[in-house]
Amino acid sequence: MRAFAFALAYWVFSIGYSLMAIGLSLLPGRKPVLWVVQRYTRRMVWAMRVLAGIRLEVRGRHLVPDTPVIFAAKHQSWGDGFCLYSQFEDVAFVTGDHLEKFPLMGTLLRKLGAIVVNNCGGHEARRSLSQRSAEADRDGRHILIYPEGHLNAPGTYRRYRSGVWHMYKNFNRPVVPVATNLGLFWQETQYRKTAGTAVLEFLEPIAPGLDKAQFMTVLQSRIEGRTQELIAEVRGGPVEPSELVSEGPVAA
């Protein structure tokens, strides 16, 4: 019953707020649409707690600087975006161009200032990422990117993509790694939900100045290491990550 109630709320909220956002996208400026998205993400976190029994515990919020940062987050669940986005007033998120296939979504994403890149990856995706994220940087907005470019089951990871490194280098911003164990309760796109306390944890920022090899090593170590610890807190024992063979489509 919990899964059904949450699924119903998910679609009602998603359709309702999307229609509202599309309508407000006709108004000048980005604030009306941003207002809707902020309320949508917070309502989804509420539905997770009340209907699915998934309570969100946020840790390390004090580590996030007051100045704009790049969030590099673990991605285990469709709920990851709701949880992180609900903590801040304005975040430019990196997403694949598959969302533009839905009617009017392209207009809505542009209005939100989302950073839409080619799912096929490569030089074209990196060029698009650089161009579109530059606007978010000029506006002084936080940027959210999932370095693996894909959802992963808890305890697994994929090769980290270099898009986050290019933003780190180009914009001279700190990168805040983000670990989570939400996938234990809302795994990838699965219908079934498991009640419990999911953790979203902001980790020590990586200051500008590292070269690519150093940066990628530190980033992956912090995210994967802490994510495995969060999983172990729930499962009651150590978890060793194993890299997936299939890379799948990537966002950057």
Image (cartoon, helix red, strand yellow):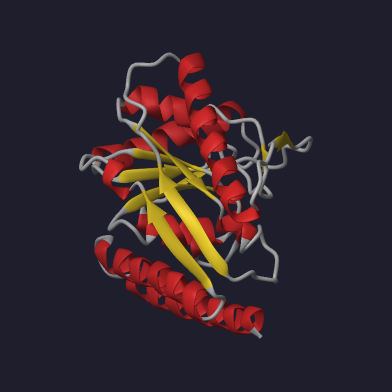
Could you say which quadrant of the image residue 100 lies in? bottom right
Name the residue located 55 percent from the left edge and 34 percent from the top edge: 225
Could you say which quadrant of the image residue 11 lies in? bottom right
* Left or right of 222 in this view: 20: left
Name the residue located 60 percent from the left edge and 59 percent from the top edge: 101
Figure quadrant of the N terminus:
bottom right
Q: Which residue lies furthest to the front in this view?
A: 236
Q: Is residue 170 above or below residue 5?
A: above
Could you say which quadrant of the image residue 87 lies in? bottom left
Figure quadrant of the C terminus:
top right
Q: Which residue lies furthest to the right in this view?
A: 245
Q: Which of 233 and 121 is in front in this view?
A: 233
Q: Where is residue 35 in the image (x, y as percent from the top left)?
A: 29, 68
Q: Nearer the viewer, residue 26 or 95?
A: 95
* Left or right of 239 in this view: 126: left
Q: Residue furthest left?
A: 66
Number of marks: 0
Q: In this view, does 130 lie above or below 43?
A: above
Q: Which of 90 and 53 is in front in this view?
A: 53
Q: In this view, does 202 lie above or below 200?
A: above
Name the residue located 38 percent from the left edge and 27 percent from the top edge: 168
Q: Where is residue 80 in the image (x, y as percent from the top left)?
A: 51, 56
Q: Where is residue 84 in the image (x, y as percent from the top left)?
A: 41, 55
Is residue 107 in view? no
Q: Nearer the viewer, residue 196 or 132?
A: 196
Q: Where is residue 224 in the image (x, y as percent from the top left)?
A: 57, 36
* Left or right of 210 in this view: 158: right
Name the residue located 56 percent from the left edge and 31 percent from the top edge: 124
Q: Is residue 30 above or below residue 9?
A: above
